[in-house]
Image (cartoon, rainbow, N blue to C red):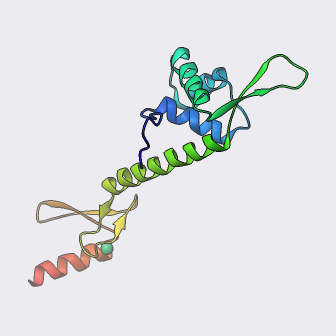
């Protein structure tokens, strides 16, 4: 469910920023930029990342972490409200990823089982057909031969 005025997480930079916030005790904008580059080979604009963090902060989703005995900020961490927000976003992405995987699924032409990566291809009647195994291909051939 999309809530009104909810911060949009419409790209990988934002999504990854949230993923880092969720998995780390605290993150800085600099850290996010470094990880984007190291993990995804993505050079994000610092302004864009800092603006997004600022926005999250203004919504009360993240808060500053102070390093004890230091004036430096240790970065940001998720608030309970922010955690809920991130979980909501992640659930939505889970669904999207599920749809994406489903659309890539192959289906055995004989038994109809879903195939993720291992499948058996055989050309039958000039058409390339996909099966879960050669036995299914055989069964398919026999069936179509007899009918
Ligand atoms: Zn099969």
- Residue farthest toward the bottom in the current orientation of the protein: 146
Q: Residue 74: which quarter of the image?
A: top right
Relative horizontal placement of residue 103, taking residue 46 as reference (left or right) = left
Position of residue 120 relative to residue 136, above or below, is above
Q: Position of residue 87 (x, y in %)?
A: 56, 48
Relative horizontal placement of residue 64, taking residue 92 as reference (left or right) = right
Q: Exactly how many numbered labels are in the figure? A: 0
Q: Nearer the viewer, residue 130 or 66?
A: 66
Q: Where is residue 33 in the image (x, y as percent from the top left)?
A: 59, 22
Q: Which of 102 and 76 is in front in this view?
A: 76
- Residue farthest toward the right in the current orientation of the protein: 69
Q: Residue 146: which quarter of the image?
A: bottom left
Q: Position of residue 140 (x, y in %)?
A: 21, 76
Where's ligand 1: which quadrant? Answer: bottom left
- Residue farthest toward the front in the current orientation of the protein: 4
Relative horizontal placement of residue 121, taking residue 51 as reference (left or right) = left
Quadrant position of the C terminus in the picture? bottom left
At 42% across and 39% down in the image, what residue appears?
A: 4
Q: Position of residue 123 (x, y in %)?
A: 19, 62
At 31% across and 77% down in the image, what residue appears?
A: 135
Position of residue 116 relative to residue 65, above or below, is below
Position of residue 23 relative to residue 74, above or below, is below
At 31% across and 54% down in the image, what residue appears?
A: 103
């Amino acid at each position: 469910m999309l809530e009104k005025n909810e911060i949009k997480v419409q790209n990988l930079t934002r999504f990854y920023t949230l993923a880092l916030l969720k998995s780390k005790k605290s993150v800085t904008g600099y850290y996010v930029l470094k990880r984007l580059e190291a993990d995804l080979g993505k050079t994000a604009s610092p302004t864009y990342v800092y603006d997004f963090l600022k926005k999250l902060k203004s919504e009360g989703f993240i808060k500053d972490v102070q390093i004890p005995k230091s004036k430096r900020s240790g970065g940001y961490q998720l608030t309970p409200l922010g955690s809920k927000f991130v979980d909501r976003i992640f659930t939505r992405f889970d669904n999207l990823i599920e749809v994406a995987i489903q659309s890539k699924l192959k289906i055995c032409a004989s038994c109809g089982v879903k195939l993720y990566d291992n499948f058996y291809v055989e050309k039958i009647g000039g058409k390339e057909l996909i099966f879960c195994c050669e036995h299914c291909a055989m069964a398919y051939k026999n069936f179509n031969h007899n009918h």
